[in-house]
Image (tube, rainbow, N blue to C red):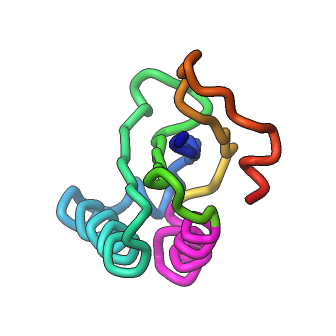
Amino acid sequence: MYRRTFFMLLKATARWRALDTDAQRAVFDEALMTVFNGYPELRMSRFNAGAFHGRCSHVIVWELIDGADVWQYEAAVEALHAQAFFAAPLFEIIDVIPGVEDDVDVIMPIAAFAA
């Protein structure tokens, strides 16, 4: 099997930057709880890239467990659109880069991302 991964590049808004550290942590905790409670075959990791990149401030890495349906990723992102995460908005989505783990022993059909 192959693992589908989505790299979501985000840009923090002024509203996000105005939050103190505890409030920022609470926003990410709420997002993580939404994902973990509603979409058990989806993993979400976050990375701060603001000091290293001029266009995006954060990267969210979404990973679907082997064989999981891509609808879990789509539904989780829609759920976050209903929260302060995207609804306020605290972040703007700059880009989403889908990918699969680079394993030369496994050949993945192109149609796999459409499934």
Helix, strand or loop: magenta stretch? helix
Residue 109: image quadrant is top right
Foreground residue, 9 or 101? 101
Coordinates of residue 5 in the picture (x, y in percent): 54, 43
Foreground residue, 72 or 16? 72
Coordinates of residue 76 in the picture (x, y in percent): 53, 72
All told, the count of numbered labels is 0
* Apparent side of residue 70 relative to residue 79 in the rendered image (left or right): right
Residue drawn at point x = 56 percent, y = 41 percent: 7
Foreground residue, 105 or 92? 105
Residue 79 falls inside the magenta stretch: yes
Looking at the rendering, the stretch of residues picked out in magenta corresponds to: 71-90
Coordinates of residue 92 in the picture (x, y in percent): 62, 56
Vertical position of residue 56 compared to residue 83: above or below: above
Residue 57 falls inside the magenta stretch: no
Residue drawn at point x = 51 percent, y = 43 percent: 3
Coordinates of residue 52 in the picture (x, y in percent): 44, 21
Residue drawn at point x = 33 percent, y = 71 percent: 36
Vertical position of residue 78 compared to residue 12: above or below: below
Vertical position of residue 45 compared to residue 90: above or below: above
Residue drawn at point x = 67 percent, y = 39 percent: 97
Residue positioned most to the top: 104
**Which image quarter is the C terminus in?**
bottom right
Foreground residue, 65 or 105? 105
